Amino acid sequence: MKTWEDEIRELNGKIVCREAEWVNNSESLKNDITKSYGIGFEAVVEQACVIHPDIDFSDVNPCYAVVDGKLVKDV
């Protein structure tokens, strides 16, 4: 027969397992969001190249912002 102490230990073990699953799922979702952002950014740059073929977009990346018509490192 289980005592309440055994039940608490069992429930604590389940909590630890659930927390580990949550951390793994959280990291996976972060990676998915980052990949999605990168793919979307690349698609926008490709579209901009088609619309404005005379502009050099080679230095454009998601870590920069356009300020006063110039690329600056986004903080």
Image: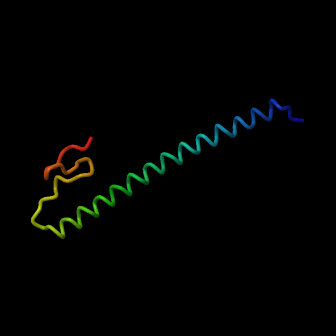
Q: Position of residue 33 (x, y in %)?
A: 42, 53
* In the depicted structure, whether residue 29 falls above or below residue 43: above
Q: As rendered, which of 67 and 44 lies closer to the eye?
A: 67
Q: Position of residue 51 (x, y in %)?
A: 18, 70
Displayed quadrant of residue 16:
top right
Q: Residue furthest right?
A: 1
Q: Residue furthest front?
A: 68
**Is 13 situated left or right of 31 in this image?**
right
Displayed quadrant of residue 1:
top right
Q: Residue at x 18, y 49 (%)?
A: 67
Q: Residue at x 33, y 55 (%)?
A: 38
Q: As rendered, which of 66 and 26 lies closer to the eye?
A: 66
Report how many numbered discs are placed on residues in the image.
0
* In the depicted structure, whether residue 57 falls above or below residue 1: below
**Is 13 situated left or right of 26 in this image?**
right
- On-image quarter of the C terminus: top left
Q: Residue furthest top?
A: 5
**Is 43 situated left or right of 31 in this image?**
left
Q: Position of residue 30 (x, y in %)?
A: 44, 48
Q: Residue at x 48, y 51 (%)?
A: 29
Q: Report the colour scheme.
A: rainbow
**Is 39 situated left or right of 53 in this image?**
right
Q: Position of residue 2 (x, y in %)?
A: 86, 35
Q: Residue at x 77, y 33 (%)?
A: 8
Q: Residue furthest left?
A: 54
